[in-house]
Image (cartoon, helix red, strand yellow):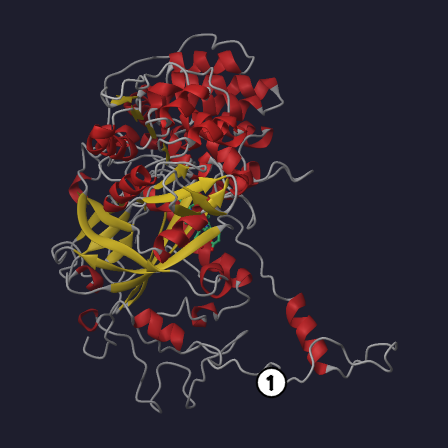
Amino acid sequence: MSDRRTIDENSKQDQLDEVREDPEREFLTTNQGVRVSHTDNSLKAGVRGPTLLEDFHFREKLTHFDHERIPERVVHARGSGAHGYFQVYEPMTEYTRAAFLQDPGKKTPVFVRFSTVVGFRGSADTVRDVRGFATKFYTEEGNYDLVGNNIPVFFIVDAIKFPDLVHSIKPEQHHQMPQASAAHDTFWDFVGNLPEVTHMMMWLLSDRALPRSFRMMEGFGVNTFRFVNAQGKGRFVKFHWRPLLGVHSLTWDETQKIAGKDPDFNRRDLWEAIEMGDYPEFELGVQLLEEEDEHKFDFDILDATKIWPEEDVPIRWIGKMTLNRNPENFFAETEQVAFCPANVVPGIDFSNDPLLQGRLFSYLDTQLIRLGGPNFHEIPINRPVAPISNNQREGYHRTTINRGEISYFPNALGDNKPRPAAVDEGGYEHYMEKVEGQKIRNRSDKFNDHFSQARLFWNSMSDPEKEHIIKALHFELGKVMDPEIRKRVVELFNNVDGDMAVRVADGIGVPPPAQKGPTGGTKKSPNLSQENTVKDTIKSRKVAVLLAEGYNHDEVMQVKEALKNGGAKAQIISQHLGMVKAADGQEMEVDKSYITTGSIVFDAVYIPGGQHVDTLKQQGYALHFVSEAYKHCKPIAANGEGCMLLEASSITGVKIAGADPNGPVVADMGVVTTRNTGKMDEFKQEFTFAIARHRHWDREKKEQVPA
Ligand code: HDE
């Protein structure tokens, strides 16, 4: 493979640099490079006369503008991208010959696009939905795309049902409502009539569908793939991404409010994190299965509605991806990028998973229309870093200038070049799986257990997580107009857990199931619960510091310093932008005014001591800020007089430090308070600990808190 171009993490950037516009940008020109002398008035016959057709600049400007939109993706229309690199931890030679998985010293450039599935391109980020997690590895052997989701299973087992699924969940065709939401009749009608969706529905109704950040969600290849080593030995493989920051979510109420206050919440979070150097990091994991073990499970490993429980097939973490560069042009990169599960490199192959088989067809097909023809691989973001040579020619938007007369094979005129590569020259050879059978429209029996893994998921949830699923069903089904559909869905979930079905029925005005289904069960898979995720870091968390004139400057500085040391970011929030004055005359710059922000876009809140609390207590915004953060189970810290703001808010049922200046630090359900200035170190420690826990769900029982 000596003729391969050397790939390092900068290779993709170098390639993108090649197609940059004139860096000087001094003069305005037409697309023909002619300098333009006017761009404010079109050419007219007289100052009040008609516009003349010969104004080529005017015509070109408008024509280009008229064609600036391309069709959005039929699913995953709204997305956000980032560049980075991937490094394997140790050679994977035993399992795969893929070159980018051999050398721990090599940094393979990547581009990732995170997305929502249902909403249109301009919809809000925080809707309840699956998130896409697609990665393009620009390897020395060509592009490899791992096109995954943040949920490890899918709704359906066969790609032939995909158009039905998508039609049912998209806005209803007669009035195009609702936008970016599954909470409507056609979707739940589909669900109630297709039991294979049940397992996926459990995930979609869980907090997984409300990620706090793209940087805090897992990714899954979902389908079963194959690793093949240099000796031609194949093994089944499932791919996983795990975020080093842990898997964290928003609350449902929060997501709805953020959708109005900052519809770009997840996009902004990704962008800002990279700008500030908090590079998102994900480890790549594989579950490997020997071919002889293919049939040893009670589910079919080709069924994409099933996970391979980690307890049965452990995950091996084989490398790490770091996202360290924002795109420079959203359209050129994030919008035009085209992922395809069929883009594989030698050493990675497919299984007969019927969902995957359909996907192998669909992506290229849809991209032909979305990107306007067969040459979209030439768009810089899609271009492999590995050299391309073949006999494909012409077509819309061709930019390559193929030289010479040869565009066929075999040929003597060109010495038979380009020629197919042998396997030891890096040629891709499809895995020689033995396949025989009758042509048949059916699936193996094991595909038909739709409930065991849905039950495993339910049983693995913590109590708050279960509560969230019930509430999600109350919301989703509460929006369904047809009571028959609601009833049918209750009957469906009755197969998962009888108690759950009764609780669901309770909230949506339908009778409980005629015959209560099974309930309980001891089989659990702990990693399915977010309760067991990473909770020991505050890196990149955002903390709001509420200030008014007369705050204690020293306390703010101390807490800010502690947060900074842990990698978190404090922002000063006050009534107005500008400077805010401390009791000792020092000043701080306000980052956000109440009117432009809200507790919903922060991870935690801090109120320092000082006379400013008298003012804060009079400010509806400040009181609401604290009550709302409490309602959303976020960590809240207050010291000195700051504690009095908590007392004045709607917070109830939590212990707050009393007035004793020598009293202890009180930490109760994520609310950390003290009146003791001598205990600032312990106070900061407790606050940091509370932020790392992310949310304090015990508080949800206190439903009387408004906000
Ligand atoms: Fe996709 N999917 N999908 N999908 N998918 C598309 O391709 C499709 C499925 C996924 O950021 C489309 O270029 C079929 C599973 C992501 O650009 C389309 C089936 C998983 C993205 C398509 C599935 C995914 C797409 C639309 C059932 C997780 C966005 C635009 C057989 C493993 C990639 C496009 C990006 C996009 C088809 C199911 C992930 C229509 C037919 C399962 C992350 O081709």
Say whether residue 76 is visible.
yes
Q: Is residue 453 above or below residue 98?
A: above
x and y percentages locating residue 544 in the rendered image: 40, 38
Who is closer to the viewer here, 70 or 153? 70
Q: Residue at x 46, y 27 (%)?
A: 614
Quarter of image, res 697? top left
Quarter of image, res 627? top left
Q: Amino acid at mark 1?
A: Gln
Q: Is residue 10 above or below residue 310?
A: below
Total marks placed: 1
Q: Quadrant of the N terminus?
A: bottom left
Q: Residue at x 59, y 24 (%)?
A: 480
Who is closer to the viewer here, 326 or 435? 326
x and y percentages locating residue 98 in the rendered image: 21, 61
x and y percentages locating residue 53 in the rendered image: 79, 80
Pointer 1 local density, CA inside 10 Å: few below 14, some 14–19, many at least 20? few
Who is closer to the viewer here, 222 or 40? 40
Q: Residue at x 61, y 36 (%)?
A: 178
| Secondary structure category for the residue under label 1 | loop
Say whether residue 385 is visible.
no
Q: Residue at x 52, y 80 (%)?
A: 25
x and y percentages locating residue 671 in the rendered image: 32, 25
Furthest residue in direction front, as rendered: 584
Q: Is mark 1 within 8 Å of ligand 1?
A: no
Q: Which residue is label 1 attached to?
A: 32
Who is closer to the viewer here, 487 or 656? 656
